[in-house]
């Protein structure tokens, strides 16, 4: 089993991929086959690797308890023709400052990390390093790379407490610097083909576009309620090339194999402009 993730190694996506791999590995190997987490530069490349068969699955973040939904990944899943979410993993986010040993916080002029990490540590950065320039990178792992490349020692990075093998001379802060200490990110395991969906699930995830008319969203919500199904999440995104139209991403507590789930999806398809099944999954609690 090969699982793609947003690299480099050490990112939260890497940690999620390793956790998924523990339960996805079959233990049966063919010649030249092995379990591996494969890094890619950005999320489009991560999902493209599943589409073109370079890997069997991908681990991507879909929601953070502070920042909300990861819009880019919602859009990518929507635009894909044959990718489905098949498992969920919730990871606690523990952001730490990584910097050169002996350097005072007041001496740090640049802080590198992924945009979500920078946003989630905004209060700490404003209080402790108000004059530091915040530099966005494609992942927390790339942030570390940028920081250690600065030979002056005036650059730092924000990365997870799980980060290992820091470059000699760099240290990790002892405390979480997130503004919210109870910070969690939901990751989804993505596979190709509808046949990769589990036979049973705890949740169903789908998208729908309502007619552009009064009460259309209320009608959609009433359909969900009429089946006695608990909606656990709803997120809206603009429909591309159609100003004023919005797509709703909805997660609900139900088993994909149940009669209620099948009837619900059929009813939504009949009463909306578009409806797409994005995934069916249970939480990986290993």
Image (cartoon, rainbow, N blue to C red):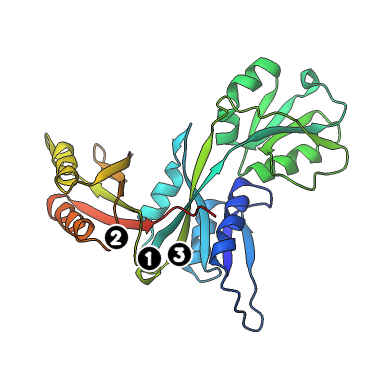
Q: Where 157 sits versus 59, above or below?
A: above
Q: Where 27 sits versus 165, above or below?
A: below
For the residues carrying marks 2 and 1, which lies nearer the camera in this image? 2
| N-term-proximal mark, 3 vs 2 | 3
| N-term-proximal mark, 3 vs 1 | 3
For the residues carrying marks 3 and 2, which lies nearer the camera in this image? 2
Q: At 54% from the left edge and 31% from the top edge, which residue is drawn?
A: 182
Q: Quadrant of the C terminus?
A: bottom right
Where residue 218 appears, x then y in whole percent?
Answer: 16, 37
In the image: residue 83, left or right of residue 35: left
Q: Where 33 sits versus 94, above or below?
A: below
Disc marking residue 191: 3
- Quick check: marks 3 and 1 in contact, CB under 8 Å? no
Q: At 28% from the left edge and 42% from the top edge, which residue is drawn?
A: 231
Judging from the image, what secondary structure is the residue with disc 3 in? strand
Residue that extends furthest to the front in the rendered view of this protein: 286
Res. 126 visible in picture: yes
In terms of depth relative to the viewer, which is nearer, 70 or 280?
280
Residue that mark 2 sits on:
256
Residue that mark 1 sits on:
197
Disc 2: CA contacts within 10 A as few (<14), some (14-19) or many (>=20) = many
């Amino acid at each position: 089993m090969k699982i793609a993730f947003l690299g480099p190694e050490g990112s939260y996506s890497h940690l999620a991929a390793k956790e998924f791999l523990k339960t996805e590995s079959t233990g049966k190997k063919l010649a030249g086959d092995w379990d591996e987490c494969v890094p890619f530069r950005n999320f489009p490349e991560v999902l493209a690797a599943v589409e073109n068969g370079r890997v069997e699955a991908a681990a991507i973040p879909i929601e953070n308890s502070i920042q909300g939904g990861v819009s880019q990944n919602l859009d990518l899943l929507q635009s894909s023709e044959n990718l489905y979410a098949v498992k969920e993993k919730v990871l606690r986010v523990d952001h730490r400052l990584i910097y050169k040993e002996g350097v005072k916080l007041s001496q740090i002029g640049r802080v590198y990390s992924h945009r979500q990490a920078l946003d989630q540590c905004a209060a700490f950065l404003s209080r402790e390093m108000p004059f530091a320039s915040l530099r966005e990178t494609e992942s927390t792992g790339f942030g570390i790379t940028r920081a250690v490349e600065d030979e002056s020692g005036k650059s730092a990075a924000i990365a997870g407490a799980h980060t290992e093998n820091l470059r000699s001379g760099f240290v990790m802060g002892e405390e979480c610097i997130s503004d919210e200490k109870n910070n969690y990110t939901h990751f989804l395991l993505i596979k190709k083909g509808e046949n990769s969906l589990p036979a049973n699930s705890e949740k169903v995830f789908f998208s729908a576009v309502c007619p552009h008319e009064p009460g259309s969203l209320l009608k959609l919500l009433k359909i969900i309620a009429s089946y006695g199904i608990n909606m656990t999440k709803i997120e809206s995104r603009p429909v591309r090339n159609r100003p004023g139209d919005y797509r709703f991403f909805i997660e609900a507590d139900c088993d994909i194999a149940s009669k209620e789930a099948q009837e619900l999806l059929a009813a939504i398809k009949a009463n909306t402009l578009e409806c797409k099944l994005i995934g069916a999954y249970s939480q990986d609690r290993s």
